[in-house]
């Protein structure tokens, strides 16, 4: 019974997380561009990745460049990776 309740709680948390991300994409902010939205998505994903590395890493220390310039620099790297992935498929 405890396992079922825990699974149900995890399901609810996942649904809320998905709804939150969906709603954040639906909200219209006057003056934003497509690039602004994509930059925000990439920054959000960057922080999600950092959080996942910390949560699942067996190491006690992980070095990741982390500052405004580093986050900005990761944007073209992600885009390049996506474009290269599309070319190989």
Image: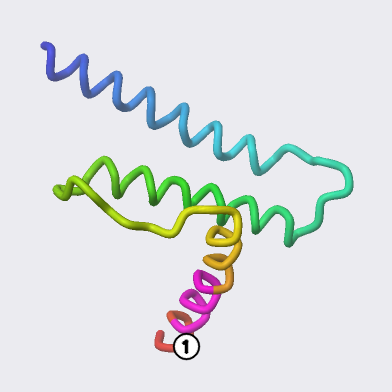
Q: Secondary structure at mark 1?
A: helix
Farthest right residue in view: 31
Q: Decide: few, some or many residues near mark 1? Use Cα within 10 Å; few <14, some 14-19, many ≥20.
A: few
Q: Residue 19: image x %, image y %? A: 53, 32
Tell me where the magenta segment starts and ends, as one range.
77-84
Viewer-nearest residue: 57 or 32: 57
Q: Residue 52: image x %, image y %? A: 32, 46
Farthest bottom residue in view: 88
- The residue under label 1 is 87
Is residue 81 part of the magenta span, yes or no? yes
Q: Residue at image x 30%, y 19%?
A: 9
**Quarter holding the N terminus?**
top left
Against 58, residue 4 (above or below) is above
**Count of labels in the image:** 1
Residue 49 falls left or right of residue 10: right
Residue 55 falls left or right of residue 22: left
Q: Residue at image x 49%, y 51%?
A: 45
Q: Residue 66: image x %, image y %? A: 47, 54
């Amino acid at each position: 019974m405890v396992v079922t309740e825990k699974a149900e709680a995890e399901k609810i948390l996942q649904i809320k997380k998905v709804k939150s991300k969906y709603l954040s994409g639906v909200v219209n902010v006057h003056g934003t561009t497509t690039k602004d939205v994509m930059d925000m998505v990439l920054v959000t994903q960057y922080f999600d990745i950092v959080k996942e590395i910390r949560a699942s890493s067996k190491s006690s220390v992980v070095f990741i460049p982390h500052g405004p310039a580093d986050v900005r620099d990761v944007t073209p790297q992600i885009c390049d990776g996506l474009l290269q992935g599309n070319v190989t498929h």
